[in-house]
Amino acid sequence: MVPTLEFDERFMQRPHETYRRLREQRPVQQVVLPRGTKVWVVTRYADVRALLTDSRLSKDVRNAGELFDRHAANGAVRTELRQSLGAHMLNSDPPDHTRLRKLVNKAFTSRTVERLRPRVEHITEELLDDMAGNDEVDLLESLAFPLPITVICELLGIPQGDRDDFRAWSNVIVSAGGQDELGEASAKMAGYLVELIKRKRRQPADDLLSELVHAKEDRDQLTDTELTSMAFLLLVAGHETTVNLIGNGMLALLRHPEQLVELRADRSLLPGAIEEFLRYEGPVHLATFRYTTEPLRLDEAEIGAGQFVMLSLLSANRDPDRFEDADGLDIRRPAGGHVAFGHGIHYCVGAPLARLEAEIAIGRLLDRFPELTLARQPETLVWRDSAIMRGLATLPIQL
């Protein structure tokens, strides 16, 4: 029987089982997401990687309004989110994408990010100090969340006292919750960022958001809507992915004790282990919306023009046609090839920062607490209810 894909609780908790059957039997399938949007989901590695750079798929949010109204039950909320927070580079095509990305590229190069290493190390050590003396902690609350949110907020120039609000709004926006919650969180996030940008314009500081407010590239300055959307993208993507990378990576290690022993014995394996964590249980589930600008045939599916397409990075990275023993964790696996950060022009601009933070957080955690173990049975852990992000709700560990 050909499998179907329902974005219900069972699927969110155990997606790999369903994706395994889909890759074999129906690798391209139309589904309805929890918030009512009809999309085609693509699951095989070769298809996903090819479509990430296919010009027949657009990400231009300005032309997607009618499609959302046609395919979604919550067009009004999506319109608000699209207009207030959606005009960023992840929702644009060249030449707009080229212009927007050029303004932030220099802040996230490997060389620039490496300068943040001492600060990331310092924050990590402070968080580990706070964990010491406890028998049990939630690793997400204690380390995986506060580290990247502190780093990205310091980079953007967002006051420390506002960071919990951002976490709450972000959780709603990337979750599969109701449209009323989405609308409220989007409005609060947008309202805050608008006021913050006004302050940066009046009183610029030594931070990335101030630079973006006053940046001029080829005499072209970002509009207020573009600034708000860019700040939103950098803030949400700048911490959500790293939270999940640290949490998912540590869970993978703790569920594979032989791999943990190897990593503790040879710390030079850590950079490669980070790449394997990204492949094995990456922080992003489905890449964000794309839509067809012309009819597209993929496998046995006929996808008409004006249809939404979402690419499962999670499934692609477990495709046995690309990765040997794809469902196994191997921190010695040759690095490269995974699509956890995307591929092509929309490849995650913050990937170097996420890798740095994860490497420092996991490495220092293992140094400080060499005997740490899971404090719950793995099957009792709950994954977040999100079609975009792949991450745990909590990760209790025994120190």
Image: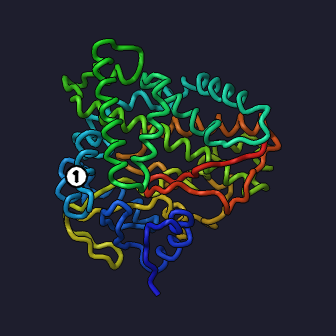
- The foreground one among 146 and 179 is 179
Residue sticking out furthest to the top:
203
Residue sticking out furthest to the bottom:
1
Taking 214 as reference, is 334 above or below it? below
Which residue does the image show at 34% across and 20% down from the upper left? 211
In percent of width and height, residue 212 lies at 32, 24
Amino acid type indicated by mark 1: Ala
Q: Residues within 10 Å of mark 1 (few under 14, many from 20)?
A: some
In percent of width and height, residue 140 lies at 61, 42
> 19 left or right of 268?
left
Which residue does the image show at 17% across and 57% down from the upper left? 66
Taking 231 as reference, is 182 above or below it? below
On the image, numbered disc 1 is attached to which residue? Answer: 76
> 76 left or right of 126?
left
> 377 left or right of 118?
right
- The foreground one among 156 and 53 is 156
Q: Secondary structure at mark 1?
A: helix
Colour style of the rendered protein structure:
rainbow
Taking 195 as reference, is 339 above or below it? below
Q: Which quadrant of the structure image shows residue 291? A: bottom left
Which residue does the image show at 46% across and 40% down from the upper left? 168
Q: Which quadrant of the structure image shows residue 213? A: top left
Taking 81 as reference, is 338 above or below it? below
In percent of width and height, residue 35 lies at 35, 60
In percent of width and height, residue 76 lies at 22, 52
- The foreground one among 394 and 82 is 394
> 87 left or right of 352?
left
